[in-house]
Amino acid sequence: MSCSSSFKLAQDLLQKIALITGASRGIGAATAKRFARAGWNLELLARPSAELEAVATECRLASVDVSTAGVNLADPTQVSSGLQQLIDAAGVPSVVINNAGAGLTSPLAATSLEQWQWLFQLNLTSVFQICNGLLPALRSQGEGLIVNISSHAANKTFAGWGAYSASKAALAAFSRCLAEEEGVHGIRVSTLTLGSVNTPLWDSPTVQANFDSGAMLSSELVAETLLQIAQTPPQLLLEDLTLMPATGAF
């Protein structure tokens, strides 16, 4: 095999590794399964659970390599070691999907500092940690795609969702700034902005809402969109793509 052929093979393999956070359920699990069916090797990060291992097992049925790291992203001290565990096991990803996050319904005046800091750690600071942890390696390989998942709540106010809206608006701003700074290194940063998606978020104890889940986007539709974004050529940047239910915002 010639040197040029070897380099191309290495690049092809490089382009087929995706790191997905929050991969144990909802959008993250659906995305992992969709990428596996498309032939992508996976690095899955989520809180330690039987659900995470079940998703990994199902993805391996597609004959792809799957590495997992059980990490509580609400604990900033766990992020670096969990990320390094994945890189040591499977290499540097070419696509990073920062999907993990949480919801919180509470009037701002009733939101405690502890709740605020917990939410911002999950929805914003952990993304900052993961991106900064990967940037040196992504710069070295000369390319990479980071997709950060934001919310329609970043652009529209909803009573009781102030802390959540603020965290997602900050995430969108972070993505734009990171894209501006890292484009010269061949690193693309996209924001996928979502309307309501039928995920376990609505059943979490921190969210009190009663919406028609049947009218929401499905996790599988979001996963399909993420795969399309991941497969765009390196000359193309989708800065901010918005998906909304056909019925509009709730």
Image: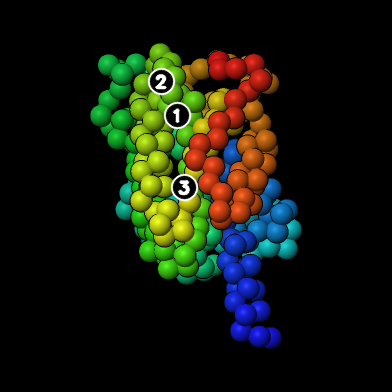
> Which residue type carries mark 3?
Val
Query: CB under 8 Å between callouts 2 and 1?
Result: yes
Which residue position holds label 3?
Answer: 189
| Residue 92 locus on image (x, y percent) | 49, 65
Query: Quarter of the image containing the N terminus?
Result: bottom right
Residue 23 - label: none
Q: Determine whether the residue tagged by mark 3 lies in a helix, strand or loop.
A: strand
Q: Determine whether the residue tagged by mark 1 lies in a helix, strand or loop.
A: loop
Of label 2 and label 3, which has the lower sequence position?
2
Q: Tell me the residue at 55%/35% (across/down).
A: 241
Q: Nearer the viewer, residue 10 or 20?
A: 10
Please rate how many residues cluster around mark 2, counting C-alpha atoms within 10 Å: few if below 14, some from 14 to 19, many from 20: some
Q: Specify the quadrant of the image occupied by residue 248.
A: top right
Which residue position holds label 1?
Answer: 103
| Residue 35 locus on image (x, y percent) | 66, 52
Of label 2 and label 1, which has the lower sequence position?
1
Which residue position holds label 2?
Answer: 161
Report the Cα–Cα distance between label 2 and label 1: 8 Å
Looking at the image, is mark 2 or mark 3 nearer the viewer? 3
Of label 1 and label 3, which has the lower sequence position?
1
Q: Nearer the viewer, residue 56 or 139?
A: 139
Please rate how many residues cluster around mark 1, counting C-alpha atoms within 10 Å: few if below 14, some from 14 to 19, many from 20: many
Q: Tell me the residue at 67%/41% (across/down).
A: 224
Please say if 187 is above or below 191: below
Looking at the image, is mark 1 or mark 3 nearer the viewer? 3
Report the Cα–Cα distance between label 1 and label 3: 23 Å
Report the Cα–Cα distance between label 2 and label 3: 26 Å
Pick out the residue farthest to the left. 113
